[in-house]
Image (cartoon, helix red, strand yellow):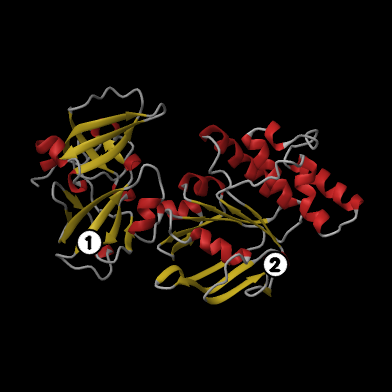
Amino acid sequence: MGEVNLEHVSKRYDDVTAVDDMNLEIEDGEFVTLVGPSGCGKSTTLETIAGLTMPTEGKISIADREVTNLPPKDRGIAMVFQNIALFPHMDVYDNISFGLRLRNYEKEEVDRRVEDAAEIVQLEGMLDRMPDEMSGGQRQRVAIARAIVREPEVFLMDEPLANLDAKLRVHMRTELQRLHKELDATIIYVTHDQAEAMTMSDRVAVINKGELQQFAPPLECYNEPKNLFVAGFMGSPSMNFVEGVVDSNGLETPDYHVEFDTGQLNGISVDDRLTMGVRPEDVYLVDDADNVANPTHRINARTDVLEPMGDEIFVYILTGEGSAAGMDAEADDSHQLLMSVNPDKDIDIDQDVEVVLDRERIHLFDTETGDAIAHGLEFASVETGPTGTEAEGDD
């Protein structure tokens, strides 16, 4: 069984806290990704599980056995690093089998394990090749096979795809998912790339400044982020954020008013400051909002920058004072929104537009603490105009 439990694990270096009171319960057979920006403590967390770093405090268990003070070789783990670190003077067979031979396994057992691992990672017929005769993806598969032959309880992978080109990274992501399914093994994977975390994981542990922010399935982190950090980190491009003040009918932002039933916000009062978050795919041109069940009032804006991506166009728009000030407002998020539109949409730079937000996809956060308050806003009665959006009011 490959369960991994971290109980109140901390790691401090003098006055620097790399990992702060980390609690994780990883189930047998799960693919869990530790994700966060550079320096957030994700690799340090992985190293404490591996035994490469001793925690300052806390307890680590693998397969119902406490391993906090055990050396790496006794923990039942195998690790794949960002630096592949193959022996350049050894062929593929010798690289894969090196650890087994070091432990004096019988040759028949070594051959069996190497052949099985080579088949899993599709290296059959390449066992006599030297590392410099292989592509980057093939060398990475050798490193993974070297981990597989140990038949560990848990695989630990520290940004193993970071040195590969973009196309190969996507291919290797698929390979790792297939490998996980075939081995039915527990995999703990470290990356700063939230796309990797979203596509491969059963659950994602989002870390910032050594602290666990959220541990949940990828779509839960995306659709119901626990705080501002998770909301901004998960998703590319990032969520739009605009600060505002609560009034009796909703939220007043610097450039527009978002109406909703404020009674759904427990513990929030009029004049409290909140941060509204909305993803680019939930910002719509009025002409495209027919299928939005609960849109906000129209927001007047001006297009600023277009980023054609092939399957969509990212459009930066300036609202209110930003629309009037143009480039001077570029750095002020309170006067800017990013939306995505269909690639065949006829839209130009410096064009006046009207947009609406999908009220049911708006998120609210406490501006001071960053904690999530609501995901999706309610509005009891919506009067629709001829375009299917709310009829504009006096505000």
Position of residue 184 in the picture relative to residue 23 (left or right): right
Query: Which residue is identified by label 2?
Result: 75
Q: Is residue 315 above or below residue 49?
A: above
Amino acid at pointer 1? Thr
Query: Which residue is identified by label 1?
Result: 262
Query: Could you tell me which secondary element the residue under label 2 belongs to?
Result: loop
Judge by depth and name the residue closer to the eye, 26 or 13: 13
**Rendered location of residue 193, percent (x, y):** 47, 47
Going from the N terminus, do you reach mark 2 or mark 1 first?
2
Judge by depth and name the residue closer to the eye, 52 or 294: 52
Judge by depth and name the residue closer to the eye, 287 or 302: 302
Tag nearer the camera, 2 or 1: 2
Q: Is residue 115 above or below residue 55?
A: above
Position of residue 274 in the picture relative to residue 342 (left or right): left
Q: For the point 51% across and 70% down, which residue is it? A: 23
Question: Quadrant where the N terminus lies?
Answer: bottom right
